Amino acid sequence: MIEPLPDIFFTQVIRTALAEDLGRAGDITASACVPADARLTADFATRRGGVVAGLACIRLTLAELDPTATFDALTEDGQAVPAATTLARVSGNARAILTAERTALNLLGRLCGIATLTQDYVDAVGGTHARITDTRKTTPGLRALEKYAVRCGGGVNHRFGLDDAILIKDNHVAACGSVGEAIRRAKAAAGHLVKVEVEVDSLVQLQEALAHDPDVIMLDNFSLEDLREAVATADGRVLLEASGGISLEGVRAIAETGVDVISVGALTHSVRVLDIGLDAVGD
């Protein structure tokens, strides 16, 4: 059971998207073709199979345009469904439903696509102890929603922003002069609840990082051979994260090296939107 994301995370995104779509004159097609008092019942249904995420997008988008509309969820976030599955049924003012359609589908399709791809990665590493996590390579303004979708697909979240963990990257190391000095400065500045992670790009840098006891070491673009050596060298002293161009085809081999976490930017930056449509329901 996925803990629902509070409505407040969706509301501003939906209002911005609706305002963009409505433009300066509103939905002139619905206004021209559909009587103001017409009613409509319609289903949101999948055109291909996937994992559900973001059903609130339907409910909240429609509520912005018709507060009296009804929303009946027939599935739940985190549920894997086949093609031709009705996710939810809505009923209300016909103009409102037709105007809400594209905004709801754009958001819902993207979130379901992220959840679906995440589950593919999670399934690929099944039986290992490696966990699949996202990155900050998210769509601007949609980070909370996209990271929620990752959780719906069985993944876990990396840091949400620059303020909830220290992650020392290669350019930070360059600015500090060395891996060790960067870790030293970070640990001196970090609060007692803030973890420190450092990115390394070689086994030499790994040895230097281990000497300064960070909480997590990111192994960036390591070969499989070097990943296995890194796991043996660390010997459980620190959490190891593999990162850098992780493909679905190659993730299993990476997990089998013994790393603890595999971060995958593609979960959010290269996702295929799940094909979902709105179908009017006849009498």
Image (cartoon, rainbow, N blue to C red):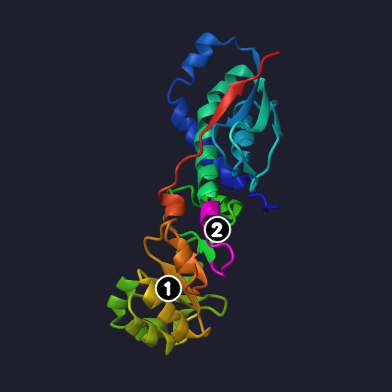
Residue 276: x and y in percent read: 54, 32
Q: Magenta stretch: residue 77 in it?
A: no
Local secondary structure at mark 1: strand
Q: Which residue is mark 2?
A: 122
The answer to whether any part of residue 115 appears in the image is yes
**Which quadrant of the figure has residue 244?**
bottom left
Q: Say whether disc 1 or disc 2 marks the residue closer to the N-terminus.
A: 2
The 10 Å Cα crowd at callout 1, few under 14, some 14 to 19, many 20 or more, is: many
Look at 40% across and 48% down and name the residue there.
270
Residue 107: x and y in percent read: 52, 39
Local secondary structure at mark 2: helix
Q: How many angstroms separate mark 1 from mark 2 (CA)? A: 19 Å
Look at 43% across and 48% down and name the residue there.
139
Look at 41% across and 50% down and name the residue there.
269
**Which quadrant of the figure has residue 224?**
bottom left
User: Amino acid under label 1?
Assistant: Met
Q: Is residue 196 left or right of residue 3?
A: left
The answer to whether any part of residue 138 appears in the image is no
Q: Which residue is mark 1?
A: 218
Tell me where the magenta segment starts and ends, as one range: 118-130
Give the number of the disc on residue 8. none
